[in-house]
Amino acid sequence: MSERPQQGIRDATRSDHYRNEVAQRHRRRARLSAVPDDPSTSSDREFDVTSALTLPTEGQLASSWLETPPGSQPLPRDLDHLLALRVPGLIATRRHLHSHPELSGNEFETAALIARELSLAGLHPRLLPKGNGVICDVNGRPDGPVVALRADIDALPLDDPKDVSYRSTVEGVCHACGHDVHTSILLGVGMLLAQLADLGELDGRVRLIFQPAEEILPCGSLEVIEAGGLDDVVQIFALHCDPNLPVGQVGLRVGPITAAADNVTVRLSGPGGHTARPHLTVDLVDALGRLVTEVPALVSRRVPANSGLLLVFGHASAGTRYNVIPSEASASGTLRVMDRDTWEQAPKIVAQVVRDVIAPTGATVDLEYLRGRPPVSNDSRAIQVLTAATAAALGPEGIAETPQSMGGEDFSWYLEYVPGALARLGVGRSGPNVDLHRASFDVDERAIPAGVRVMVQTALRALAAAR
């Protein structure tokens, strides 16, 4: 693993299936660090997390959640009753995380909370080298297989406008993608599986991965891989919140379930000059206008229509004065594509189109194309495990088909190394739903125990299938 390529390096031995060359660079294997016996005093960055874990009065509470949903199968060893007792604390944990979000790469307090909760459950979490993520094995039968479950833990750079008691207390930072829910679910899974392990009824190891930096590049999944997070793992699974599905349903799909997502930044430069005499200089505002309007349309004409390529510029900037032609301009955006073969060709296509469009303007072009993540492509056997687990956890009505999304997810990098699958967890609320990455996004918290049941059943079935 220490010599495996990450983004930016070609792996010749796997080139027939994994031909991507990307911009992020391989680093030597990092070492995980043990969490001290008393994690509450392990870092001067950690605040007192437990004092805030009290359940507010509004919203969906544990009383509205049935221990065993209709048509489902009970968890072993009366774990359903234990889960029902844990639900208020898990909701409180989610609301605390929502109130105290941390941006990608800076999830130190979040990691400290996770480590403390896992330690209190009798487990032995280990911090990622930077201290902003956690890996924790629930050790069952020592000769059994290893199955991994992953939750991402970072927040987004958005203000939180919601009128709720758990509104973000951090200016400009908000859990608008449900990672607080993912984290709380995986904590609940760890608590239940630890109980099974103590009873000697866990047929292998379940690795809990609390991953930082899903929302940025370089991707946090690469840090986990480099730290040995996939060592000995035979399958890996994850859930992601989906506000378009109601609570009690899980969206499943074999093959690609997300799109590839890359970042594109184009910088233009020229001599600058007076707006009265554009013929004596390079009109960068005109060049920028051509870039953001013509390039996306032309790029899409260079690839098959069913590849779903979408180039969208989200930021453009040029000049500071109405009568001055600027000497610098820039635009940045994302390129998303559903088809992996097209994704591998995209950097060359974008570079050629940008040059062709800008050349007549006389502007100098600097293109930065940063590879982000390939599509998440779900393994068919892993989906079989998830399908059986969902039916057992939520009943047959819990299984839903889901389309491929144009969103990106760095869970895809784990699937470059081991088979696995990502499923969509229904979190839809009554009334109009708010999409992911909007600051007002919120969830029906009954999704938390639903997610715990699905992931526990998934872990148990994956271990049994891998024996």
Image (cartoon, helix red, strand yellow):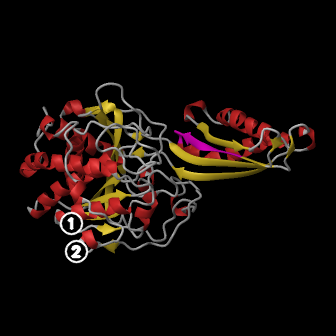
Asked whether residue 140 appears in the rendered view, the answer is no
Q: Is residue 57 above or below residue 197?
A: above
What's under tag 2, amino acid-wise? Asp
Residue 297, relative to residue 347: is it above or below? above
Near mark 2 (Cα within 10 A), the count class, few <14, some 14-19 or many ≥20, is few
- Please identify the dominant SS of the magenta region: strand
Residue 467 placed where, x, y %?
21, 58
Of 227 and 464, the residue lying toward us: 227
**Residue beneath the point at 29% across and 31% down:** 429
- The residue nearer to you, when weighing 158 against 219, is 158
Horizontally, residue 20 falls left or right of residue 428, namely right
- Quadrant hosting residue 58: top left
Q: Residue furthest top?
A: 431
Q: In this view, does 96 lie to the left or right of 265?
A: left
Q: Distance between the residues labelled 2 and 1?
A: 8 Å
Position of residue 269 measured from the top left corner of the image (x, y, whole percent): 79, 50
* Element class at badge 2: loop
- What residue range appears in magenta? 330-339
Amino acid bearing label 1 = Ser
Residue hosting label 2? 37
Which corner quadrant holds the N terminus?
bottom left
Q: Residue at x 41, y 53 (%)?
A: 415
**Disc 2 vs disc 1: Cβ atoms closer than 8 Å?**
yes
Front residue (pair 360, 400): 360
Residue 337 shown in magenta: yes
Task: Name the residue beneath numbered marker 1.
Answer: 119
Residue 393 x, y percent position in the rendering: 18, 40
Horizontal arrangement in the rendering, residue 259 relative to residue 426 (left or right): right
